[in-house]
Image (cartoon, grey):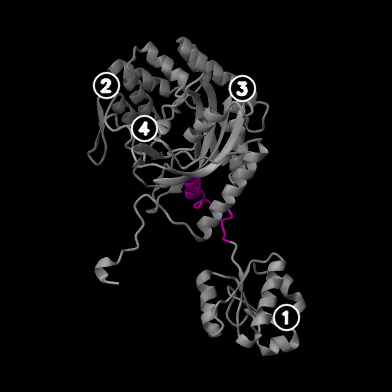
Amino acid sequence: MNKEKQIKATLPSGFKDRSGDELALKKKLLDIIEKNFIKFGFSPLETSPMELSSVIGNSLAEDDENPMADIFTFDDSGTDLSLRYDLSQGCIRYYSQNYLELPNPYKRYQMGIVYRREKPGNGRFKSFGQCDVDIIGKFDIKQANAELCNVIASTFIECGLKKSEFVINVSNRKIVQGLMNELKIVDEKQKQKVLRAIDKLDKEGFGFQGVNELLRTERRDSSGAITKGANLSDEQASKIIDFLKVKDLSDLKKNMMNPLSQEGIKELEDLFEVLKYSEYADLVKFEPSRIRGLDIYSGWILETALKFDVKNPKGKVIAPGSPCSGGEYLVTKFKGDPFLGTGISIGIDRLIFCLMQKKGIDSKEQKPALVCIMDPKFLEKYYEILNTLRDNNINSEIFLESNKKLSKQLDYASRRGLSVAIICGENEFKDNTVTLKNLKGAKGENQITIPRENLINEVKKYI
């Protein structure tokens, strides 16, 4: 092939390959999460990774001039298609198509890849995995939302987190929507900017000052980029900032008289009452700044936060964002009566990014034992050893070149990080023995010869 035609092997920005311990952790977590979703009574669903763009909508975008800017969209013979940016839209479309045949309420879980055209970094990618549960139809909202809090708490603990290492922050959009009504903020786009400004409170480089700037005319970040603000008055912006500083629900109830705000507060009080019946009530806290950036949410809001240090590749402690979030939504875009939904989504890639840095999480790849080939004439016997190992549920492989020197085979094992190699030559086969080489042991003390009948018990000591 001419050099001009050769392609450089490069991964596009915002995407990630995984292998080894990191991929082992991902598979382990996915298994734990799925089993826990099933334990809580959710049924599996798989929807298409592509939807009609009209179904996807533009709930994600912050660019008014280009509302589909954050979504991968394609023209397919005159039909606009989009890669899903979350798993909720497909679930909502599926329910709208099939609700007459589905139980009411419908409880589903789904695990899959989603796609977003956004700036990558610190555990954020353009393609990443989500693990969702949703409850859709007719149900008691306080019980459903309490159950979702319990699902998160139980799942995170099963994944290896301690109760002291995470918190489930909840709020209700009705509270701040009532406040905006009180402040005479009536323009829908302005309301949207207010909600998105609040949502950035705990983002790196924001805080109250950054939110205050976004509530007013504009914010200029460290790079010089300008984000247009909500254009609130000084008084309007100050009252919203004051609201965000209140952490006690009872104090909020005394000071916010708007009926919609009072409704949101009452719904949170009802939620906390039901949570008393579970073992996870102490993990759920009221946090007024939880507002969620997506426009679909209508009431209760949830975001988890980790309570241990997470660092970027340069070693700087960062705010990695929420590994699990969600909320309550009302679906009105499809024909027919609107229906209520509530759900949560675990960002598996963000969770992996954080847990890979935490001590005490078992993330080791289950690597095999290697059966080495000392003499090709004994190939059948080497396969007998291999089959014996596999029949006893021991991960194992045979070296795939019969004419390589033992040193090359052991070099392969070393590159793979294997723990044990099984070596048998003419003497071992004659004496019905096997030699085990401890590939992690000290030189001169890392090799033993044992009776063939002890093979399984001895190999298990290394794997």
| Residue that label 1 marks | 450
Q: Amino acid at mark 4?
A: Gly
Q: Are marks 2 and 3 in contact (CB under 8 Å)?
A: no
The kind of secondary structure element at disc 4 is helix
Gap in Å between the C-alphas at discs 1 and 3? 64 Å
Residue 101 shows up from this direction: yes
Q: Which residue is mark 3?
A: 139
Does the residue at mark 4 contact the one at mark 1 (Cβ under 8 Å)?
no
Q: Residue 184 versus residue 381: which sits nearer the camera?
A: 381
Horizontal side, residue 107 vs residue 221: left or right: right
Q: Nearer the viewer, mark 1 or mark 3?
A: 3
Could you say where residue 463 lies in the image, as x and y percent from the top left? Answer: 64, 67
Q: Which residues are magenta?
A: 348-365
Residue found at x 41% / y 27%: 295
Secondary structure of the residue carrying numbered label 3: loop
Q: Up-down: is 184 above or below 116?
A: above
- Comparing labels 4 and 1, the label whose residue is closer to the camera: 1
Q: For label 4, count other residues whose C-alpha is less than 10 Å away and answer few (under 14), some (14-19) or many (20+).
A: few
Q: What number is the disc on residue 231?
A: 2
Where in the figure is residue 345, as x and y percent of width and height?
Answer: 51, 37
What kind of residue is marked 1?
Answer: Ile
Where's the N terminus, which quadrant?
Answer: bottom left
Dot 1 alpha-carbon crowd within 10 angstroms: few under 14, some 14 to 19, many 20 or more: some
- Give me the disc on residue 207: 4
Amino acid residing under circle 2:
Asn
* CA separation in Å, label 2 and label 1: 79 Å
Which of pointers 2 and 3 lies earlier in the amino acid sequence? 3
Residues at marks 1 and 3 touching, judged by CB atoms closer than 8 Å: no
Q: CA distance from mark 4 to mark 2?
A: 18 Å
- Number of residues whose C-alpha sits closer than 10 Å to that of mark 2, classed few (under 14), some (14–19) or many (20 or more): some
Q: Are marks 2 and 1 in contact (CB under 8 Å)?
A: no
